[in-house]
Amino acid sequence: MASCTNSSGGSFLHDLSIFATASILTCAAIATYNYYIDRKVEQLMKESKEHEKNEEEVAPQTRPLLRKAQGSYSSISKPTNKSIASSLARVEGIEASGNFLSGILGQLWPHLNVAISNIIKDTVEPILKDLPVPIHFVKMDLGNVPIETRNMFIRRVDPDSSSGKAGVGIDMDVLWDGDCDILLQATITSSLKVTFGIKKLKLAGRLDVLLSGLTTDLPVISAVQYAFSNVPKVELAYTGLAGSLTSKIKYLESTILNIVEQSLAGILVLPNRMVLPMDLGTYDFFDTYYPPVGMVRVTAVEARGFKVQKGRFMKDIPDCYVMISLGASKFADPPFKTSVKKDSLNPVWNEAGDFILYDLDQEVYIEVWDKDKEEDDRLGNAKVAVRDLFDKDGAMELPLELGGEKNGCFITIRADLHHLSSQKVGSFSSPSYAGKNQLCGLATILVTKAFDIPIPKEDAACNVKIIYGKGGDFEKTFYTPVVMDYPGIDALNPMFNSVYHIPITAAMLSDKTKNKTVTFILVDNPGANGTKAHGELGTLICTLDEVISADMHMITKTSFIGNKGAKLEYRISLNGMLSEDEQTKSMSSTQNLTNSKANEVGIYGGIDDKKGVTLRLTAVRGRGFQIQERKGKKDDVPDVYCSVRLANSKAEWKTRTIKDDTMPNWNESNDFHVNPLTEVVEVSVYEANSKGLDELLGNATFTVEKLLRKRVMEAEIKEGSGMFVKFMGIKIHEAS
């Protein structure tokens, strides 16, 4: 018995000695590792001080970094994009409080409440029903507190050489602290359903409203477009959850918020815009569409101020990397991610990601992370508007925040603007745009409308499915909205007015890449009256080679889709990239391409009738003609007429002369047999002179193709003169 006891005691002492030895060795290893970390930190601090000392010895004009004492929001580096990007950042306009619009919204709120509720239900509920725990709206009332607008800024959107469009932009803060009554029901199982509500909904964001294109006929504005520059901040306060929350329902709280943000990003955050036509007589989506500002290349330069992470036993120098996104891009594509800089308190990356920039008020979102074996740790985040970056000559050092508070760490980023070009696409093959995270171009697809849908009107509920690179490595799929039969809506000739952007990389244009195509599929869905879907009605395929070889790398057509008689109107364009220096050279070498006849013919396609049509051309009116002052004589008020000539058919026509009028109204028409794809209307405007030769005041040209699309067009007859003529063109019948 005693022997057994002694043996057990000996075994215990043996195990204890092994445990003690292991513990000592472990502590020694931890101490050695922490000693190594301390020496590593000392070395890093020494290198950092030497770097700062060397930096101060460099001449200010060549110094790579220039920081203020506090290190916050300071300009850095010699500016590379000051000439254009900085000028874009500084816009002249008028500031307003927004109270006037808030008052209007307050009066309209009872009606807006219902309209917005319906939109939310129709947009969000289909997504909620597809969740692992399906949810649907039981009740929705947005309450009595209306949306407010503040800090309004009104600016002129001037036409430029690339777009030739003008409008009025209105930027405003949109705030809503709604006392809503929203009831939702979650179906956990067929027999277990949990109802919960939302009693508070807060929303705050910057809204961009664009009034364009501008005309000289009431209501003056062709369309109103609006979108948030960035995903607005949304807060939800729930009710009815106490005592009944399961782990799944708790998960749903954050899921619902994420779905709301994604839904907003998908329909009302740039690049997505809501478009409200104001004058269908002059409204043309091709002309209303505003292209992106360009491409912004955001570089994570360096960061500083990180601390050694102290765990329970061991210290750790962070392994830092950066994630960057722009505006709502994080909902469509993964953020740009830098490499990991191991064991660095002041990491240097100098790595860049490219983003399509739609508005200067879009914000760059930066997150800095510490790479770990299990779960990465967030070290801080920052954000800055692109406008502020360009206003600081393209580079800033930003303070990082963690948990809503500054943590003493900083990151330096740089932004370079690259312009879109429809004339030069050298970037498609340039090494400067061939990197892993670099864009060399942009493909834009506009789908405006379909014609002659071959099904009964009451059944029609059509949309278009667009597939870029079908079956290839870079396949992307988009869907236009579904247009159903409804009072005031022509479901057999539906208007989609949708635009989709596809950032292009060098790999996507490589000869090794297959299926470089754009596929349009016209689809009929279940009708509003409960009728079954007719399914696919037709397919149309366009190759990227067609677009690249087209004039200005753009095709605009109305083509048959399928073999049942339906047609689709669409545009596909490809733009290359130009750096600031390249853009400056391009602007100086191509002063006036818009006067080229070849440049105009084919851009506004959409008339497939090659055998000819009868065009009724109307000279509507003119404006801006000048009274000539004559000393000692009566002032000379102009007597104006138009001489019209068709460039290809050589047909001519002359309007009557309107005497003593600076705003002549002719309202005269003449019919011509024309080929709409090639014919050009040339207008010469004269002042009649009874005592000598008539004086030529100026000229204007209209392509028949564009005139038939827009119906009414106005052109300045002499650049900078302020003298305009307006013409109307309609197709009477097909010529035999």
Image (tube, grey):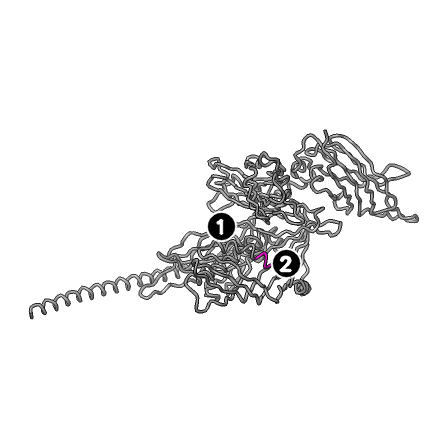
Asked if residue 93 lies in the magenta stretch, the reply is no
- Whether residue 53 is visible here, answered yes or no, is no
Rendered position, 686 above or below 90? above
> Can you say which quadrant of the picture contains the C terminus?
top right
Q: Secondary structure beneath disc 2?
A: strand
**Pointer 2 residue:** 171
Q: Is residue 62 above or below residue 42?
A: above
Q: Position of residue 561 (x, y in %)?
A: 59, 37
Residue 223: assigned label: none
Q: The magenta stretch spans which residues? A: 114-120
Residue 558 point in image, percent of width and height: 63, 37
Q: Give the quadrant of residue 593.
A: top right
Q: Amino acid at mark 2?
A: Asp
Residue 245 appears in the figure: yes
Name the residue type under label 1: Asp
Please give the residue where the numbered disc 1 appears in the rendered image.
Answer: 333
Camera-side residue: 373 or 540? Answer: 540
